[in-house]
Image: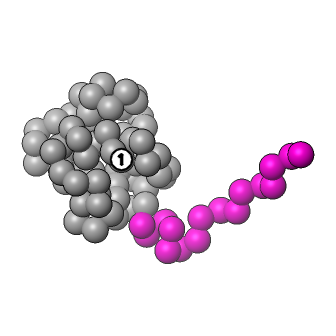
Amino acid sequence: MPTPPQRPPDTRQLQERREVGDRIRFLRRQRGVSQERLGEMVGRDRQSISNWENGRTPPSLDDLVAIARVFGVETWRLFYG
């Protein structure tokens, strides 16, 4: 059975993506880590990190858990600050 086409994200979803991306960027910069280095640490490329930080694509739950571990924070901090 074919999968139904995905709907584009609504305004709320886009805002949430940007907020999570802003928190990732804040933590990364606070700790002096480059996008490339963070990508190496979580098994992604620099472009993925850039896309997350700019709200273009959302990180997966597994990626969020990996980022939280790298920065030594609880995963929920990436959602709620």
* Magenta part, dominant SS: loop
Name the residue rendered at 42%, 42% in the picture. Answer: 62
Residue 81 placed where, x, y %? Answer: 22, 65
In the image: residue 11, left or right of residue 27? right
Vertically, is 16 above or below 36?
A: below
Please provide the residue range marked out in magenta. 1-16
Which amino acid type is shown beneath numbered disc 1? Leu
Q: Is residue 50 visible?
A: no
Name the residue rendered at 31%, 39% in the picture. Answer: 66
- Determine the image quadrant of residue 65: top left
Q: Secondary structure at mark 1?
A: helix
In terms of depth relative to the viewer, which is nearer, 76 or 51?
Answer: 76
Q: Is residue 41 visible?
A: yes
The residue singled out by tag 1 in the image is: 64
For label 1, count other residues whose C-alpha is less than 10 Å away and answer few (under 14), some (14-19) or many (20+). many
- Determine the image quadrant of residue 71: top left
The question of residue 72 being in magenta is answered with no
Name the residue rendered at 49%, 66% in the picture. Answer: 14
- Determine the image quadrant of residue 10: bottom right
Vertically, is 58 above or below 43?
A: below
Residue 46 placed where, x, y %? Answer: 36, 31
In the image: residue 53, left or right of residue 3? left
Name the residue rendered at 39%, 53% in the picture. Answer: 54
The question of residue 8 being in magenta is answered with yes
